Structures are given as structure tokens and as C-alpha cells.
Image (cartoon, rainbow, N blue to C red):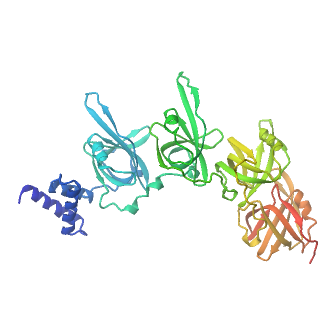
């Protein structure tokens, strides 16, 4: 046998020894397929080496330690082997070193179920990866890389000693999250830091020009992304303003390595940085920018809703902790999915001059407060209200009456009807705002029984209720169960109506 043939046989023996589930015929077929993919440019020995590596076997006959998880990487490692899914590929670039030689660098994001790492390929390795035509979503294996720190993060580098294999044969597809799992939707962004984001552009502001402290001119613009039941602002700086100027509303984009920052008002927004990238994923996406009231949750920001004004409360004045005076008025809004209270603060109270009960409001850039107590909607720092806007379809009316058996903890501003079961018990309780009256009794319908707690002025009205009366309680809230009973409680807009005067 020639030396090369002996080497091939030795490699095959090592493969069969370490991967006993394979047959000799299967290994020969893999070697032939590897040579075919290379259009005959590989020797059989070279193809055998590639097959061995793809199967997780080093040339010396030892298993490759490529099972290290990306989330476990630390800086200063000199021999790293990992397997992961390609999340994003940045354009390659060439550069000239101090000795005059030309180099090439290509950066990708690589991820597995434990984390994501920025991975840099140098020179020949960058050339090889670029020629391979690898796309996001593919699984690759990196052997003999090294790590270092860059801007406070771990970075994986692949140099002369490193090796790269596309779709290694022993990598199980299901063990690596699908590509979309590495991207959050706007409604899922909850904390500051780096993020990959996917959403649909539903709004944008014209660019603004400003002068920096050093005298240079800068530009900034904002777009609103929707998805995942929420909204978030994407902030574009300088070159990004021009690069994304032609992207229209209704375009789904992918944002790579955006910086999530917290605004003064507590809301989150995403900024594009030097290593960020944006991909156009889909155009002409039909997205309903309006969130239904029934889908609102505490903590949501960037909320756009269309709702009908059911009731307008009284203007209330209050004193802040700094001694300043403030004003607030509450509106009760509804669509076909439910009702929610909206608060207008200070200068926003002047909107009452334009709003009447029955009007349709389009609320832009609101946020949801919640707990303790019912949820409420307020305007964000860039929030605005349109009254009876043109081109906006009025929402259907909400469901009028719920049966007691349908009530679930957390439901707000619902209306129920039932027969008073027992005499209301009125007592005084201590609250954070002093002592107040509360009346407790039970009502029932054909589907179940509920405990009712009516507070303050409504407690006085409850004193006139008698067992056997059929009553309607409008805009009440469903509380956590009390002694395994459904509990409903009054709120700002709760009303009681007697439907008969009977007594049993």
C-alpha cells in the first residue's frame, strides 16, 4: 500500500473505533461525498481527515472537545472548540498591517442554548468561511479558537491554528435553538443591555440635526417597532439615519446587537451602535398597530389603542411630595375586549375641552401602570391623543354582562348581575389613606356565587340593599379568591343599579 492509502485506512480505523455505530461502507460513502462536494480537488486522505473532524475525531484518534457551551466561555482561553448556530454574518473587510501585509477579517454571531458570542475569523479562515457560502441558521463547528476580551465581552477568535466545519455530522439539529429564538420581539424586551430584535416598523419621526459638544454635527431619528404584544422605539444615530431612511412603514426588520437603554421616564428604547446591524426581512407586512384593551398588561409601554369613552370622572387636585400641586382626571375607555381606566395628568387635563362621553380616542405611546390596584393607562413622554380620528374604525362595544361562573382573577371593569344573598355587613378598615367604610355581602346567579366588597360611598349605598334584590354592579374588579370564593371589588367607576325591589 502507498503511504497515503495507509493513512486513509488508519483514519478509517480510528473512525470505526470511536464511532462504532458506523459501518465501513458508510465511512467510505462519506469520504466520497466529501470529495464530490470539493469537485475532486481533495485527495482521498484529505477528505478522510475532513470526515473524521466532522464526526468529532481528531487526527490523533482522540475525540474533539467541541462540547463546550458558549455560555461557559471566558476570556484568556487558548484552545477552544465549540459548536453553534450562525445567527448573523457581518460583511468582511480587508485591512493592511503595520508590516505592509494585507489581512482580512470576518465577524459572525454564534449561539447555542446557553448564550451568544461574537466570533472573529482572520485571514485564511475568513476566506474559507466566505467561500463556503454559509448563511444564518446553519450549524458550524469551530476547533482550536481562542478567546479574549473586547469592550467588556468575551470574543472568540479563529486564526491560523483554527479550523471550521459546516454542519458537522454529529451535531443534532434539535439541540440548537432555531434562528428566530435568538431574536426578541418588542413586547419581550424587559431589561437594559445587548439584544437582538425583530419587529415591524409602524411609525417613524423625521430626523433631527444637532451640534455636539465638540462642534460636530449629528443626526438622530426614531422608528417604532411592533411585535409580541408591545412597542419599542429604535433610535438611529448619524449614518444609521441615512442608511434606513428609505425603509417604509410595514417593513419587518431584524436588529443585531442593539443597545437597550432606559429613558428618564423609565421606558426602554433600543439604540444602534457601531457593531449593530439591521436586516430587512419582509416588506408590506400587514400589522394591526392597535392593541386591544383585553391584551394590556402592567408594565407595557409604547401602547397604541383605539377605544370609546364610556365615562369621564371629576378633576382631582393633589399635592406631590415636593410640595407642588398636580391635577388628574380619569376616563373609562372600552373596546370589544374590555375596559380600562385612562389618567390624564396636569396639562393633559386640558384635553377634556375636546372629549365627550361616546367619543373615540386614538391613544399613541401610552404605558400601563398596575398594582396595587387596577391597571391604568397614561400617556408616555411622546404620547398624544386623537379625538374621533379620521380613517380609524370605531371599536365594537364591550360585552355588557358577565356571568359569575365566568369571572377570573385579574378581570377589571366588568359588569355582573345577581341576587343579593345576605344582609350587607358594613365596617371601617384602616388603609394607607386613612379609615374607610367597606360593605361585604354575597350575590349569586345561575352559574355561581361571589363575595362583593364595596368601598367608601358605595358602602353607604350597600346599606340599602336587602336579600332577594336583583342588582347590577358595573365596572367592578375581580380580586384573588377569598376563602375559595370569587371576590369582586369596587373601583373608581363602579356603579350599583337595583333591577327590582323584591325581597325573599
Residue 366 falls left or right of residue 187: right
Q: Residue at x 89, y 71 (%)?
A: 423
Image coordinates for residue 149, horizontal then vertical, percent: 39, 39
In this picture, is 260 found above or below 22? above
Q: Foreground residue, 139 or 144? A: 139
- Residue 369 in view (yes/no): no
When asked about the image quadrant of residue 405, the answer is: bottom right
Residue 485 coordinates in the image, percent (x, y): 75, 71
Left/right placement of residue 392 relative to residue 213 reads right
Residue at 67% in and 56% down: 292
Residue at the front extreme, as displayed: 391
Q: Give the image location of residue 319, x and y in percent.
A: 81, 40
* In this picture, residue 77 sits left or right of residue 242: left
Q: Position of residue 483 (x, y in %)?
A: 75, 70
Image quarter of residue 172: bottom left
Q: Is residue 24 above or below residue 89?
A: below
- Name the foreground residue: 137 vs 501: 137
- The one nearer the camera, 504 or 385, is 385
Residue positioned 34% across, 50% down in the render: 134
Q: Kindly tell me whether residue 491 is visible in this rendering.
A: yes
Amino acid at each position: 500500500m502507498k503511504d497515503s492509502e495507509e493513512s486513509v485506512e488508519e483514519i478509517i480505523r480510528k473512525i470505526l473505533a470511536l464511532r462504532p455505530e458506523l459501518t465501513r461502507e458508510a465511512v467510505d460513502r462519506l469520504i466520497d461525498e466529501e470529495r464530490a462536494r470539493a469537485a475532486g480537488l481533495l485527495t482521498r486522505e484529505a477528505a478522510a481527515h475532513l470526515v473524521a473532524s466532522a464526526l468529532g475525531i481528531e487526527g490523533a484518534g482522540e475525540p474533539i472537545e467541541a462540547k463546550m457551551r458558549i455560555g461557559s466561555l471566558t476570556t484568556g482561553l487558548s484552545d477552544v472548540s465549540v459548536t453553534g448556530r450562525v445567527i448573523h454574518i457581518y460583511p468582511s473587510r480587508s485591512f493592511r498591517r503595520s508590516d505592509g501585509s494585507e489581512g482580512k477579517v470576518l465577524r459572525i454571531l454564534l449561539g447555542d442554548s446557553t448564550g451568544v458570542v461574537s466570533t472573529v475569523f482572520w485571514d485564511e479562515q475568513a476566506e474559507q468561511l466566505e467561500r463556503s457560502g454559509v448563511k444564518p441558521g446553519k450549524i458550524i463547528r469551530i476547533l482550536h479558537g481562542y478567546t479574549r476580551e473586547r469592550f467588556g465581552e468575551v470574543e472568540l477568535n479563529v486564526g491560523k491554528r483554527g479550523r471550521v466545519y459546516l454542519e458537522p455530522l454529529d451535531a443534532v439539529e434539535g439541540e440548537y435553538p432555531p434562528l428566530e429564538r435568538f431574536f426578541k420581539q418588542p413586547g419581550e424586551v424587559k431589561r437594559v443591555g445587548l439584544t437582538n430584535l425583530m419587529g415591524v416598523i409602524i411609525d417613524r419621526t423625521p430626523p433631527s440635526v444637532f451640534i455636539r459638544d465638540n462642534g460636530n454635527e449629528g443626526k438622530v431619528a426614531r422608528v417604532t417597532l411592533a411585535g409580541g404584544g408591545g412597542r419599542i422605539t429604535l433610535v438611529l444615530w448619524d449614518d444609521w439615519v441615512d442608511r434606513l431612511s428609505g425603509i417604509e412603514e410595514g417593513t419587518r426588520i431584524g436588529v443585531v446587537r442593539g443597545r437597550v437603554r432606559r429613558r428618564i421616564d423609565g421606558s426602554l428604547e433600543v439604540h444602534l451602535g457601531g457593531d449593530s446591524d439591521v436586516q430587512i426581512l419582509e416588506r408590506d407586512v400587514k400589522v394591526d398597530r392597535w392593541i386591544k384593551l383585553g391584551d394590556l398588561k402592567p408594565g407595557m409601554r409604547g401602547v397604541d389603542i383605539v377605544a370609546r369613552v364610556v365615562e369621564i370622572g371629576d378633576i382631582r387636585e393633589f399635592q406631590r411630595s415636593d410640595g407642588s400641586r398636580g391635577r388628574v382626571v380619569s376616563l373609562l375607555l372600552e373596546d370589544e375586549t374590555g375596559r380600562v381606566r385612562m389618567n390624564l395628568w396636569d396639562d393633559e387635563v386640558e384635553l377634556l375641552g375636546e372629549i365627550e362621553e361616546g367619543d373615540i380616542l386614538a391613544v399613541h405611546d401610552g404605558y400601563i401602570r398596575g398594582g396595587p390596584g387596577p391597571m391604568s393607562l397614561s400617556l408616555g413622554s411622546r404620547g398624544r391623543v386623537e379625538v374621533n380620528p379620521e380613517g380609524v374604525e370605531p371599536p365594537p362595544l364591550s360585552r355588557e354582562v358577565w356571568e359569575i361562573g365566568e369571572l377570573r382573577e385579574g378581570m377589571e371593569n366588568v359588569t355582573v348581575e345577581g341576587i343579593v344573598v345576605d344582609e350587607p355587613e358594613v365596617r371601617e378598615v384602616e388603609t394607607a389613606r386613612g379609615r374607610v367604610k367597606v360593605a361585604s355581602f354575597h350575590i349569586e346567579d345561575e352559574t355561581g356565587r361571589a363575595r362583593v366588597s364595596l368601598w367608601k360611598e358605595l358602602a353607604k349605598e350597600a346599606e340599602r340593599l336587602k336579600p332577594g334584590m336583583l342588582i347590577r354592579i358595573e365596572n367592578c374588579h375581580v380580586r384573588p379568591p377569598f376563602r375559595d370564593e370569587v371576590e369582586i371589588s369596587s373601583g373608581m367607576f363602579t356603579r350599583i343599579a337595583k333591577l327590582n325591589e323584591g325581597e325573599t
